[in-house]
Amino acid sequence: MSEIAYIEYNYIGEIAGLILAGLILCAMVYTKPKNTYVYKYIFGGMILSVIAILIHISILVVANNPDEYFNNEVFLGQLLCFLLVYNGVLYCIFSYVNMMSIVRRSQRKEFFVMYSILSVVYVLGVIIEIASRNFYKRDLTGIDITHFTRYYCGAGIVCAIICFNATLTNLKDVSRVIWDAVSIVVPVDAMILVAQMFCVGRFNSIFSSMTYVPVFALGYMLFHSNPYDEITGCQNAFGLDAYLTKHLGKKKLYICYITLMLPRIEKLWMEDNDLTLKGVAICRAMESISLKLKMYRVSENRYVNVLETDNENEFFRCVNSIRGVLDGAKSDLTSPFNYRIVAGEVYEEINNLLKCRQYFEYVARRFRDQNSSYFYITIPRDYDDFLEEFEISGALEDIRNKLDFEDERILVYAQPIYNVETGSFRVAEALTRLKIGNKIINPDKFIPIAEDTGTIHAITCIVLDKVCKAIDSFVEFYDFDAISINISSKEISHHNINSEIFDILDKYDFDLSKLRFEITESAMFDSYNQANENMTSLTRAGIQFYLDDFGTGYSSLERVMDCPVRTIKFDKTLLYKSLDDDRMDDILRYMIEVFKKNGFNTVIEGVEDESQNQYSVERGFDYIQGYHYAKPEPIEEVKKYFTRITKF
Ligand code: C2E
Ligand code: CA
Ligand code: CA
């Protein structure tokens, strides 16, 4: 038997690469990932990969059957096309790996120049190879493309080495995941390329697409894919972000913001409960309302449905169907659950993601304490209210981030408090205002926002410092007992609030009894132990506490007696009610008596006119605070109510 050197390339590896590339490309188109700076390299690279593989397969088909398909010019054209597209693929990998490092992004011009030079070398190499006529050898039994294959694999290895080196020299600027991926994938790739160079001559098998398709697939999976939730089949918050980033301000959208007060679906799942199926059925039913309705699960129990339409009626139809699904589920399920739906148009002005998210969260928050199901369609007024809150929360966050004790946006006012016995003013309460532009915002508006956004503590620190500064400037020249500041109930139970307070107090050397704190009942009862501990150590340092807004909470007199406070500030509503209602008057009378008997001082707030003043004096309050005596003024002004110390 004579040996025939019959060439038949096996390109199963390329077919596999083609299938993989096709699948990933479909996933990329379907999941609509966020269009980030580097995503275009992955997406473009994947398209080029598909083209490269198709050309490569066509080359192999011709190489395997030269007698049927061979035409010298066309074949040469195929080879050149492949080499160019392959160069494009390498460019995408190269750029992707490098641009993942922010530092490299700033040097992208240099990179482009460097890559262009490499490309020129590469193309020149091809021309020389072709001119020297050893690029491929044609035979009746097939075309030997060993040389061609080794040529481009060589280019691939050069690219791999450069990528590896670029990452290595840039190690401190790339994330660990990039380094891990590069340090595994690049050597593996280089090995496959070497194997390809070897195998093409020995076993006639071609699998070079396995060196680039997985690279893009990996990049996509790690950084750009938006996974779907396995149980509900919803995309996650990143998917929603990607969608909104792309469409906000360009298309008319409606959003339906749903909060389900249902046990977690995952939890039900573990309990293998029939409820799970019903919970999931809610998602299925919502999804099937309209093909245009996109459903996202943005947190444990929050779902966002987005509808893209110009037709308002379609929106109403959809939200009503959603409501119907939830009402149906409610009556169907044995365990109780509630939902809150806030739905509405995404106004044109809502042109960025943050604003959009915060707007719906803002409206939804209004109903968070609701104990029943709630369905609400937003109105334009909501957006105006939101804008105001958005402005306030933005300013508060900025204040917190800068934490400048001199911040001029925090204005400290103070209101003197009248001492009934002496007929003079010896104490005052500091009250904060927020200044944004020319507007002065009252604490009733911004304090709750500060508490919600976690900026309250910064505000307290700044106010504390400003009040200390004022006290420091008064002590030498004015005779007064103290200035009090309001501490939010959320703060006093925080474990390291004291050390932060003392950090500020340490800067001043006036007697700490000149400073007092006002806290509300809720501070005492939410997490009693920690709050009590904090208050005790502050009291030991000389700072007295007032119990503020007494009469608005639900606490019993007995519990209040246990608080480490010396002074009780009765809320103004208690005064107004007592003036109207004899039974309330009796209760007030009794409470004052009990407090006095137990050694507490009593203050009444909100005294606006002479009749209220008269009443307060008769009932025996020790101190009176209200517009009747003075309104809050900038804190520097409050000294005029105190007596000046005369020096001899
Ligand atoms: P509050 O502690 O009960 O303060 C008394 C409020 O009553 C002040 O409102 C004061 O201006 C107002 N007021 C005084 N006299 C009268 C009067 O005769 N009639 C009426 N109707 N009101 C009177 P303001 O300054 O708007 O403060 C509102 C609330 O905001 C304060 O209530 C306090 O709880 C809170 N707050 C103010 N500043 C701060 C702060 O720096 N930190 C914290 N956490 N809360 C603050
Ligand atoms: Ca107060
Ligand atoms: Ca009060």
Image (spheres, rainbow, N blue to C red):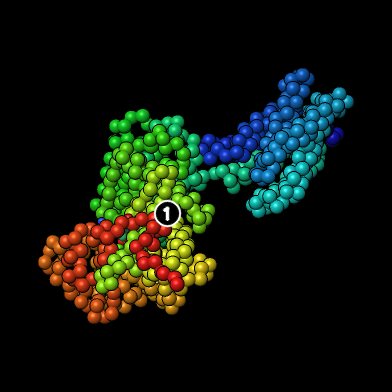
Q: Residue at x 42, y 37 (%)?
A: 350
Front-lying residue, 246 or 634: 634
Q: Is residue 464 left or right of residue 185?
A: left
The amino acid sitting under disc 1 is Leu
State the quadrant of the N terminus: top right
At mark 1, the secondary structure is strand
| Ligand 1 is within 8 Å of the C-beta of the residue at disc 1 | no
Q: Is residue 110 above or below residue 613?
A: above
* Residue, far left: 582
Image coordinates of residue 384 in percent, x first then y, are 35, 40
Residue 611 against residue 91 in the figure, above or below = below
Which quarter of the image is occupied by the C terminus?
A: bottom left
Residue 285, x across and y down, in percent: 34, 44
Residue 74 falls in image quadrant: top right
Residue 12, image x, y percentages: 67, 38
Residue 635 shown left or right of residue 161 in the figure: left
**Residue at horizontal 77 percent and vertical 35 percent from the top:** 114
